Amino acid sequence: MTFLEAKAELKELAKGKHHYVEYGLTEYQSGRLEAKCWLYVDPHISSLGDTWEEAINKMKVKLGLIEKKVDLSEIPREEIKKEE
């Protein structure tokens, strides 16, 4: 997804409200690059991702349009066992 595609999708999600799109690229001394995609919709709803897709999906979760997906690999094994 490009910057302009993300902007167009955010405009749809914002439904006429003030919205903002920002892209940041940090280059570390080692040469490693780190990208951050930031989206904002008034009033005070923002999301940050490493890609536009990630930021858009997080925004959709915050707006209640999709459910947050849980990655079980991020949950410690002992927590999974407690739930079983």
Image (cartoon, rainbow, N blue to C red):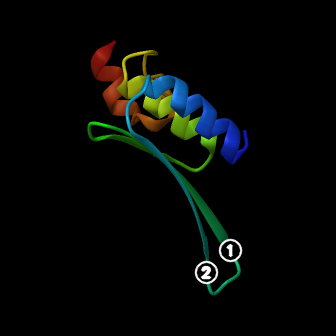
Q: CA distance from mark 1 to mark 2?
A: 5 Å
Q: Residue furthest top?
A: 84
Viewer-proximal residue among 70 and 80: 70
Above or below, 43 against 48 in this view is above
Q: Residue 73: where, in percent of width, then height?
A: 51, 33
Kind of residue at badge 1: Arg
The residue carrying mark 2 is: 28
Q: Secondary structure at mark 1?
A: loop
Image quarter in which the N terminus is found: top right
Q: Secondary structure at mark 2?
A: loop
Above or below, 12 against 19 in this view is above
Kind of residue at badge 2: Tyr
Above or below, 22 against 51 in this view is below
Q: Is residue 20 left or right of residue 81?
A: right
- Give the quadrant of residue 33: bottom right
Q: Residue 45: where, in percent of width, then height?
A: 32, 37
Image quarter in which the C terminus is found: top left
Which residue corresponds to the image point at 62% horizontal and 42% vertical from the top-left? 52
The residue carrying mark 1 is: 32
Q: Is residue 13 left or right of residue 81?
A: right
Asked if marks 1 and 2 touch (Cβ < 8 Å), the reply is yes
